[in-house]
Image (cartoon, rainbow, N blue to C red):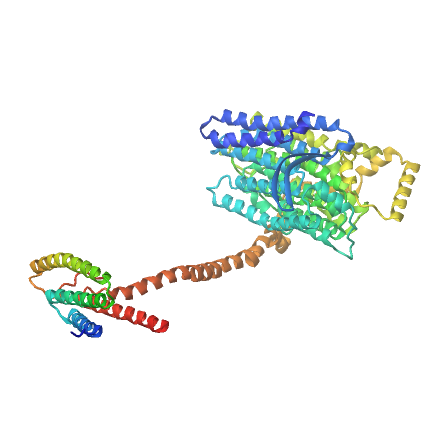
Amino acid sequence: MPILDHLWIILALPLAGAAINGLLGKNWPKSAVNSVAIGSVSLAFLAVVETVREFLQLPASQVPWVRTYFPWISAGAFKVNFSLQVDQLTIVMLLIVSFVGMLIHIYSTGYMAHEGGYYRFFSYLNLFMFFMLTLVLAANIVVMFVGWEGVGLCSYLLIGFWFLKQSAANAGKKAFIVTRIGDFGFTVGILLLFWTFHSVDFGTIFTQAAGMPSDTMAQAGVLTAICLLLFTGAIGKSAQLPLYVWLPDAMEGPTPVSALIHAATMVTAGVYMVARMHPLFSRAPIAMLAVAIVGAITAFYSATIGLVQTDIKKVLAYSTVSQLGYMFLACGVGAYAAGIFHLMTHAFFKGLLFLCAGSVIHAMGGEQDMRKMGGLRKAIPVTFWTMFIATFAISGVPGFAGFFSKDEILNAAGSGPRANVPLWLLGLVAAGLTSFYMFRLIFLTFFGTQQFDEHKVHVHESPKNMTIPLIILAFLSIFGGWFAAPKLVGGTDYFESFVHPVFASYAPQPPAGQEESLAGSAGEQGGIRPNPAMELVHAVTGPPVIVGLIGILVAWWFYIRRPELPEKLARSMHGLYRLVLNKYYVDEIYAAAIVRPLLWISTNVLWHTVDEGLIDGTVNGSARLAREAGGKFRELQSGNARSYASWVVVGAVGVTALLLGIWMKVH
Amino acid sequence: MSVVPISYYLVLSAVLFGLGVVAFVFKRNIITIFMSIELMLNAVNLAFVAFARAHNQLDGLVFVFFVIVVAAAEAAVGLAIVITIAQNRRSLNVEKVDLLKF
């Protein structure tokens, strides 16, 4: 098992690429930078493929496969090893990250071809791959945290890639600071985790947690506290309410970055972390409920904002926030496999949507406002068709990838063991909103009449290195979900059965009575065995599909059939429209409630009072004391010899008196 | 032949020393100040000699020789300075030599 023993190779390749390009690439031709960047990522992908091949031959008893490379921190009882692990969950994430990452690297060579700082861009992108793979491969939470913070750093660097633009620099800072709020909770969670279990290794923690009594709704213990703290980190990293505000602003970065970091991989790290920590979450029902509620509300809330945005990337950003909400909803109702499944399909279709948006922006010469596009269908056919497919996928049209994963999530929310009908309804409405705003995007961009001056804008299809990744991802956006397809006709869900061992291990034992009833219902199902054709019909006409189709029809009615309607509607519901258009004024509320008071305190209290008054005052004050005392004492040095003579006499008398005093005391 | 008691010498030494101090502080002429320093040195020499005689020890006498040698050296250096000041200032008044100050 050569590569399973040397998992570090997967990490070392992109790190080496980042170092080579970052240190040496400045004066290299673009082709050299390309070959280092794409070469390292492609080799990492091949290493992942080889890992998968070897992993599949492992006996089940050796999973999870953990390899420790060196002791990293050893301070008393606190011991951290640099160790990596592979299990089914890791395999899924590794494949997504390395493959989508590779495609986006290739795409970037076309998209960034005319930009300055080419080597810098690819160096950051490779560094991101390194940290993301570290996060995914980590076998303890501290190594995971390294990846977690590292991807945050790369996100900051890449959002602010065009740092001469003030808004881009600010967006980078915003992303970093807002995420940090969540990371504070994550850090405290890690400490509490170590304090409780005396270990940071996943295996040790989970084994101990499995022996602990579960928290209940009525009685929240340390497990609930840990899970809520860790989830705070996930809220920040995965842009959930109330910390989602950084993600829409992150669209200031280059579009491939939005596709890779802010759609396909980094923002899903929170979902991955929750799924990875499932033995703890499953034993903390309050935390689970919190995850589900935050997920469902975010899914609905950000979908409503997406309805009225006019910037093509902003629509996709809010859509990403909404889809991440779905993943958390899935985790919150205990359907981790469905959440990870949606993570995968979302990586395909949302990555594709962003890349297509990039291709559109590229074709329009930098224009991002959808109202100034229109009728692009004929001019850029490859982009149009691939984006069309991705839109079908995200809208959950039967047969496309998103259909399978979204269906599973809503099923679990509606009728799973932790079903929650209000949250299911929220998710369902959000599904309708999703298909509406996505088709609105398509109709505004590609259909209707051209809203731009054809002589000024030279619309052109993107080069091959951009369109080929689009085509591959479009293929995956259709077939990426078909692992679950046999389930529709009563067969097995291959994805779920693949990751099942991860989520079945350490799962809490249901109470005796419940187990029986579960077994009973399973037997019943086996007994009746519904007609596969009926199952299929039932699945493709379920509520999510119906709602999705309604969304599409409404979008068609509004933007193709009666294009004057949206404006009329906006005018008649002016107040609501302005509220949503301005994103519920959340940024303004945060500015007024948090940012400005903080700035005021920092400026007036911490800066002017504490720093200038207290600290500078002490330092300058002691200097002034010395100077003024010196000023007084130097006047003794009058230059008059007779005054010196007097001082000598005074000194002599003083010394004599002293000696006399001592002598008298002795005798 | 009666022996003069040591206290007589010491009183004389103290009187001479006091005169030296007063002259040292109040006189303005550099030469006079210089002479008052010599007076103080010799007052101390007298005390040394008196003690040496009273205790029948040589140490005090040895110290006196040292003081005389140092006083001679000091007189040489001091008078050289006095001559330089006199040449530059055309005056021996110490009040007028006060440039070296804060």
Vertical position of residue A166 compared to residue B17: above or below: above
Vertical position of residue A584 compared to residue B50: above or below: above
Residue lying at 61% horizontally and 32% vertically, measured from the top left: A11
Give the mark count: 0
Residue lying at 64% horizontally and 39% vertically, measured from the top left: A81
Residue nearest the observer in this picture, A336 or A1: A1
Q: Is residue A524 left or right of residue A42?
A: right
Q: Is residue B90 left or right of residue A293?
A: left
Residue nearest the observer in this picture, A359 or A243: A243
Residue A221, quarter of the rendered image = bottom right
Vertical position of residue A33 compared to residue A556: above or below: above
Residue A258, quarter of the rendered image = top right
Residue lying at 69% horizontally and 47% vertically, measured from the top left: A198
Which residue reaches farthest right? A527
Res A175 visible: yes
Res A111 visible: no
Residue lying at 69% horizontally and 38% vertically, measured from the top left: A343
Q: Position of residue A378 (x, y in %)?
A: 60, 30
Residue nearest the observer in this picture, A464 or A456: A464
Quadrant housing the N terminus of chain A: top right
Quadrant housing the C terminus of chain A: bottom left
